[in-house]
Amino acid sequence: MMSVQPKSLTLPPEVWSRIFSNCEANEKGLTHLWTDCRHVSRACMSEVEALFRSRYLPKVCISFDLGDYYHGGYENGYRVCLIVHFAFNRLASDGNTAIFKDHSCAEDFMPVVSNRLLSYVALYNNGAAINSPKHAFKLKRCVNDTELPELAYDPKERDLSFNWRQALTCFFIEERVKDACVNLRLLTPSSSGMAEVQRVRAAQDNGRMSMEEGFMCLLKHYGGTHHEGQRIARRKRIFRQWKAHGWTEKQVLADEDFEADERAALSTLRDGAQLLDLQQSSDDDDEEEE
């Protein structure tokens, strides 16, 4: 009697590639791809990473706020805000290290920028910039100051490098925590978001609030909830980093500068996200015209 071999349920790589490439390419879709789909199997991991290498890693931008510089001297010179942007250039031969290039800084300021970057990278790798990172990781409409594992800077080549897989994992894990906090506060029946919707609806039914006013109230509530979600996700990361240095959460919160540093960092990230949103909307319009 002939035995019938079961058909394989494994899809060929080109099918997985097409499935993943057609996933919704917004921020939540990318988070799902990296934190969920990538871990289904080795084949899925390979396809997801290939997709990110080709499509999304080139869209990553790393920015550094290196403070003010008085060109020509403090008294007679002029002030320059040293903000530099690094764009993806290539992968190193090991496949793990992403190399980014700076094309935004004027030659006159490069010696100062290089010195400050070298100092920052040394401080960062020694754990001295946990509360107030001076960098921002940007992808699509998301911006955060998450970790850049194995961060290095080559002043001669102007190369910034880090482990891209680990960096994306840090970035998307924090996005996932933030989204979970937002959903909990907006979508659960007893959440503040549902309570706000009911309050606005009642006010509109009674004629005490226009449709436009109601929309603005809900938009403001969403913005505040999103900001709080990022604060919670960011604190989880900071507590984890300090724990590696032997500090407890209570000790971190007792630092008199902690909350001020946190407010400043969150404000900077919020401003950066708003600017990214405008840039991304413009890019989307250009793609539609093409």
Image (cartoon, rainbow, N blue to C red):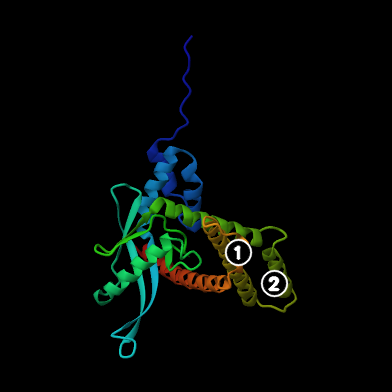
Count neighbours of disc 1 (C-alpha within 10 A) and say few if under 14, some if 14 to 19, many if 20 or more: few
Q: Along the line of sight, which residue is nearer the eye, 87 or 189?
A: 87
Earlier along the polypeptide chain: callout 2 or callout 1? Answer: 2
Mark 1 — residue?
251
Mark 2 vs mark 1: give the one in front: 1
Mark 2 — residue?
200
Q: Amino acid at mark 1?
A: Gln
Q: Amino acid at mark 2?
A: Val
Q: Position of residue 70 (x, y in %)?
A: 33, 83
The image quadrant of residue 56 is: bottom left
* Rendered view: 65 above or below 74: above
Q: Is residue 157 visible?
A: yes
Q: Along the line of sight, which residue is nearer the eye, 278 or 67?
A: 67
SS type, badge 1: helix
Q: Residue at x 31, y 86 (%)?
A: 73
Q: Along the line of sight, which residue is nearer the eye, 69 or 122?
A: 122
* Rendered view: 225 above or below 40: below
Residue 76 left/right relative to 246? left
Q: Residue at x 42, y 46 (%)?
A: 48
The image quadrant of residue 183 is: bottom right
Q: Is residue 85 visible?
A: no
Residue extending furthest top? 1
Q: Along the line of sight, which residue is nearer the eye, 94 or 75?
A: 75
